[in-house]
Structures are given as structure tokens and as C-alpha cells.
Image (cartoon, rainbow, N blue to C red):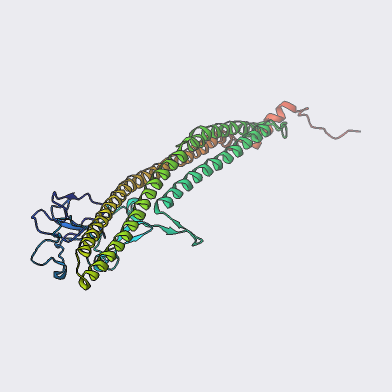
Amino acid sequence: MEDPPGPWQKPRKVTSQPGEDSLNCPLPPGWQSYMSPQGHRYYVNTFTNANGYHTPVTPMHQMEPGHMSLRKPSGDPQSPGSPRMPRRLARESSRTINCVTFPHPDTMQEQQLLKPTEWSYCDYFWADKKDPQGNNTVSGFEILLQKQLKGKQMQKEMAEFVRERIKIEEEYAKNLSKLSQNSLAAQEEGTLGEAWAQLKKSLADEAEVHLKFSSKLQSEVEKPLLNFRENFKKDMKKYDHHIADLRKQLASRYTAVEKARKALTERQKDLEMKTQQLEIKLSNKAEEEIKKARRKSTQAGDDLMRCVDLYNQAQSKWFEEMVTSTLELERLEVERVEMIRQHLCQYTQLRHETDMFNQSTIDPVDQLLQKVEPAKDRELWVQEHKTGDIRPVDMEI
């Protein structure tokens, strides 16, 4: 058998009179008949949020003598105030925590996750959680917002890290360019001198490569990281305020329910007291007072049902917005991580290209070093600087 629909499903209410199902069978006070999305009839107590597939029944001692209806002869509409129902048993199916109603852990049936295989935000952040100090509670949605804001801060710090890398590249390029103009060993000659001159030139070429690398880091990595979702904080505040307002409305509705519940209890006690007085002393005045007390009790029950209905509407609205907003936060997080991943990949690609360009600047030096020939250098130098090839001989007497 399927579980009764939870708050994540949109049930269809069966058109019927209050307190009766679609088969015109009487239901206990506060119970309504609904049709689940799967096409199964189930019942919800708007007084306690208890639910189930079995038709609820009223204990026989609460039935009016000679009637199979729970309505009083006065014709007052049924409500939690007429007659009194066994609240203790009904309450066991749910409990309210911080104004949000959850299934009772001892009686709840297993709920299906909205996105069972994805560890989605929309499945795991319904309850509140104590803060690290243990003094206050933080809503699940607030925890998700904190993660988003932390992600934005991490993104900003990554951009700052890249900025430091750019500064290092620019300083390095400046020093390389300066060093390439140094005159040390400028008088080296021959093939070794050519290799040495090329090595110094390669420093200037390498400096240019690093300048280009720093420029691309700025335009292709740092700037996108800084500009991505510039209005991120503003958007997060919008989500926060919207969900917080709905949660406040839910708390207000819950307060109204508790107030109406208290009023009903007082009316029921008053009715019971007057009924006991009537049993002791019969009089027309006592009967009128009982009728009046019964009407007030019924009215209090109707008020409670109305407050519970408004509470359930507020909770459904909060639930729907929670699902929508958490899925949006999930999408934004995926988008942020993917964006950062792409730009860090761009960083590594630029780094590889820089290494390739650096290698290209050093390749000519390698080639010239392979061609260094001391003998050839000696020949060329001697030809240019020789002073004579006639050797001295012994002096004759």
C-alpha cells in the first residue's frame, strides 16, 4: 500500500460536505476526505494533521443516541468542538517543531525523496539545526545560503590569488627584460659568444612571453572570476527574505492555531461543566445555557479548523517555495563550480602555452650550444688576431 501523501505531494480534495466523505458516510469532527495523486482516497484531520487511508471512526460513546451522525439536534455544523474527539491518539501521527509540522518518528511511514539519487538540497534541509554555540537554531535554508555566500567568498579569494600570480609574472618579466640588457660577458667571441648572445636575447623573449601570460591571466581568468554573478549577494538576500517571510507567516498561523486550540479547550470545559450542572438540576435556564455553550464550543471548533486550514496553506506555500528556491540554489552552485573549473582549466592551458613559448625561446640557445666548436673558434680568432707565423731561430756567431 502506498504511503499517504506527504506535504511534497499535491492532493486533490474530494468535494463533499464538512465531516462527510464522498460516499456520504459520516466522518469524525475535523476529518476531511482527499484523493491522492495516485488515485487513492485518504483522510486528513485538519485539527491535528493526522492522516491515513483507513476511514476514521468515532467511538460509540460519542455518538448521539438514535443517530448515525455526529451532528447535534440543534443542527450546528460538525467541528472539533462538537463532540470532543480523542486527541491523544490523533496527535501521535505528527509533531510540530519550530512551527513546522513533521510526521511523528514513531508512527511515520517511509517518505520517498524528491530526487532519490542526487543528494539534492531539496531533500535534506527541512529541519532547523542548532548553531555551533548551541544557543540558537539555524534554518536549513539559512545553512544553504551560508554555503552559497561562502562559495562566493572563495571565488573572490581565488581571483585575489590569481591577481598575486599576475603580479609575480609582471615582476618576473620586468626582471628578465632588465637582465637581458646586462653587458656581462658581452666580449665573449666565437661560436660560444654567439650562443651567449642568444641566451641573453632569449631572456628578453621570455620576458615578453610572461607579460602576455599575465595579460591573459587577467582577462581570461581573474576578470571573469570577479565579474561572475556580480549581484550574487543581492540575489541571496532576495531568497533569504522571501523564505524568511513565509516562515514568519507560518509561525503566525501556528500561533493562531494554538490560540484557537486553547479557546476550544476552554469552551469544551465550560460545556462539560454546564452539562454536569444540568444533570444535577434540570431547568429551562440550564438547558438554554447548555445550548449557548454548545454553540460557542462548535464555533471555537470551527475557528480552530479554519486556523489549521490557514496554517496548512501557509506550510504548503512555504514548502513549495523551499523546493523551488533550494533547487535554484543547487543550480547556482553547480553553475559557480563549473565556471571556476573552466577558468582554472584555462589557467593551466595558458601555463602550458607559456611553457611551450619559453621552450621556443630557449631552443635556439640549445641549437647554438650544440654548435660550439673550440677548434673552430680558435681558428677564427687566430686568423683575426695573428701577429705572424714565422717562428724565431737560434742566433748564429
Where is residue 106 drawn, in percent x and y? 28, 68
Front residue of this view, candidates 230 and 76:
76
Quadrant placement of the N terminus: bottom left
Q: Please determine whether, in this image, residue 214 is positioned above or below residue 291.
A: above
The part of the image, by quadrant, that contains residue 276 is: bottom left
Q: Residue at x 69, y 30 (%)?
A: 181
Q: Is residue 129 left or right of residue 24?
A: right
Where is residue 13 drawn, in percent x and y? 17, 50
* Residue 133 in sight here: yes
Q: Residue at x 42, y 59 (%)?
A: 129
Q: Is residue 395 left or right of residue 11?
A: right
The part of the image, by quadrant, that contains residue 266 is: bottom left
Front residue of this view, candidates 65 and 120:
65
Residue that extends furthest to the top in the rendered view of this protein: 384
Q: Please determine whether, in this image, residue 183 is positioned above or below residue 321.
A: above
The part of the image, by quadrant, that contains residue 192 is: top right
Where is residue 275 drawn, in percent x and y? 22, 68
Residue that extends furthest to the bottom in the rendered view of this protein: 280
Quadrant placement of the C terminus: top right
Where is residue 303 drawn, in percent x and y? 27, 53
Q: Residue at x 51, y 61 (%)?
A: 133
> How many labels, in total?
0
* Residue 337 in sight here: no
Front residue of this view, candidates 324 and 262:
262
Residue that extends furthest to the right in the rendered view of this protein: 397
Front residue of this view, candidates 370 and 197:
197
Q: Is residue 61 left or right of residue 109?
A: left
